[in-house]
Image (cartoon, helix red, strand yellow):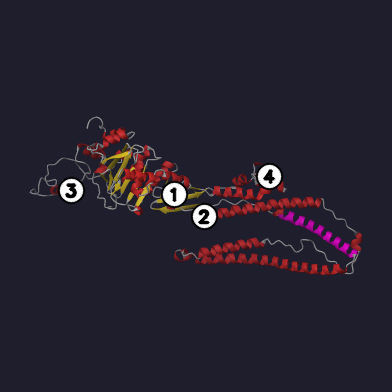
Amino acid sequence: MDNLKDFDSDLGLISGSDCHQWDVYPKHDETEKMENKKFFTTVKALPTFKGLLLTFTSPTTRFRRKENKNDRYLKEIEIHNTIHQLSNGINVIIGENGSGKSTLISGIMNDSANYQKNIIKENSIKFDKKIDSQRTKCIKQFQIVDNHNKSDGDVFGKSNNLHKPIDHTNCKNKINNFALSLKKQINEQILVNKITNEIKNLNFLIDVSFEEINTFYVNISTSDEFATIANPHEERLQTINNIMSLVEEEFKNIYYTQYGKEYEKEIDIIQASLNIVKNGIKEKSDDIKLISKIKNSIQNKINDYMTEINKISTESDEQKSKYSQSKNNFISRIKDKIMITQKHEESTLAFPQKISGFTENSVQGFMFKSVAQYHDKNLEDDFFSSMFIDKYNNYERIKKIKTLEEFAESVTRAKIDNLDEYWESNKEKFIQRNCNSKKSIMEIETSMQMGNTLGEMSLVFYKYTTYNNNEWDILIIDQPEDNISNNKINEELIKYFNNLRDKKQIIFVTHNPLLVVNLDVDNVIYLEKLNNQINSKSGCLEDDENKILDIVANKMDGGKETIERRLKIYGKGN
């Protein structure tokens, strides 16, 4: 009786009785006066000593079993004209490797491979009905491992969408923009160096005679770059327009009319502020465009004028014109050098600050969280190490690049003829690697993070699956013990399956005796293949006719020891 000390029940005593009518228990019969009637409890067991022994060694699974109201379950399986009744509770399929256990599971699910269909046909395997696939949850062997490997560590698989995807747009934009600015700066460095070297070798001889010569027409000359004006405002204007479009689309979302009406004032301020910025930048851009338009118009008129003058100009006039053109180009190169150098010296790039990247999804008492590799990290060192060889793997070294050859040498795996290709390739690999995410699950009530190893994540998978069971009636699993230690099977997995004992039907294949004996399954189906024919037996654990406990003891590794630990006396006399 020691096993019942901690049993959560109002039972005060277990005793025998010679009561002939259960409806008057604990009195002998209906003739006795009924006062303070006590109701008896129920036990699920065969009326044998072994049944009683199993009841006392697992009272929580045997006493006061609730009625399972789930009537959508598989009731029987027929193998070679032998009908095996299934429990609307916990059913287990055991047997040696190759005995047909997984084939039986595939047959139940009606998704057998061709060789399995042949086995089913040859062994006359039939099912009492075709199960409703929409109300059946099947976890195949290695499915959890495959999900883990193919879904960035998510044992539930991408299709479940429990771990919400992270929007990496902000991270990608910031890295792309920095990479673009860095490349532009390096090219400016190269240009400054090139112009500097050109000017060192550039000379212009002042010819006093040409300075003093006057032509009979006005000689007008401009530099080659006179009508070419850079517009630094155009790119920013395009970016602001894109931002405003995104903001406009965001605030059109029905969310803001249903749940965010209090933000109406702030939304107007945001849009008005962006509009002020846009108009300011547009005004500056329009000014540049107007100047460019005027200069191009002037240049066209000068070209037309000089074309007409050239028709009547003398050789001396042409020499004077060429001299003036060369002089203007020389002066223009000097001015370009000064402007580009000044602009370059003023430009300082700052690597993006730490970027946030994570999602949280609260479902049925669990928090599913995804965290991007880049989340809240300083990525600068990683970026330069990914883009450049060791000699150039920081910003200060990059600023010393002076030639295109040196630029190509600095970029990992690149050469001059494929510099752009490897620049983009290195950058995309860096972004892709940092956009990988780590997934975790937390039980909200306890605030405990659950599972880092594959075994722990498997336990989380089964806990979530068994605790959230409204969408299915039958749970089918092929080897739930995979990757889970025996201690965790005993402490956790058995508890999760017990949660479903009188709610749903469970059918699973196992090689682990703990999931047969300690779980105290309601029904065992044993398969054995002899001469390519499947032989089968079934029954509850205490079924002596089919010797189910003997099969568990002799056919499962560790079966006998597991039974002895439960019954204490098994093997020492029945």
Front of the two marks 1 and 3: 1
First in sequence: mark 2 or mark 3? 3
Q: Position of residue 238 (x, y in %)?
A: 62, 62
- For marks 1 and 3, give the CA distance: 49 Å
> Which residues fall within the magenta stretch?
315-343
Q: Viewed as shown, does residue 222 lie left or right of 142?
A: right
The mark found on residue 409 in the picture is 4
From the viewer's perspective, tell me whether residue 499 is left or right of residue 348: left
Q: Earlier in the sequence, mark 1 or mark 4?
A: 1
Comes first in the chain, label 1 or label 2 = 1
Say which residue appears at 24% left-offset and 29% top-offset.
572
Q: Quadrant of residue 452?
A: top left
Tell me the number on the disc at residue 55. Answer: none
| Distance CA(mark 2)–CA(mark 4) | 35 Å
- Looking at marks 2 and 4 on the same chain, the residue that comes earlier in the sequence is marked by 2
Residue 231 located within the stretch drawn in magenta: no
Give the residue at the far top of this rendering: 572
Disc 4 packing (10 Å; few <14; some 14–19; many ≥20): some
Q: Which residue is label 3 attached to?
A: 39
Q: Tell me how far mark 2 sits from mark 3, CA to CA.
A: 60 Å
Picture residue at 83% right of the left edge, 59% below the top = 326
> Disc 3 on helix, strand or loop?
loop
Alpha-carbon span between mark 1 and mark 2: 19 Å
Q: CA distance from mark 4 to mark 3?
A: 89 Å
Give the residue type at disc 1: Gly
**What amino acid is at disc 3?**
Phe
Q: Position of residue 502 (x, y in %)?
A: 28, 48
Disc 1: which residue:
157
Q: Quadrant of residue 312?
A: bottom right
In the rendered image, which residue does mark 2 sit on?
A: 167
Q: State the predominant SS element of the stretch in magenta.
A: helix
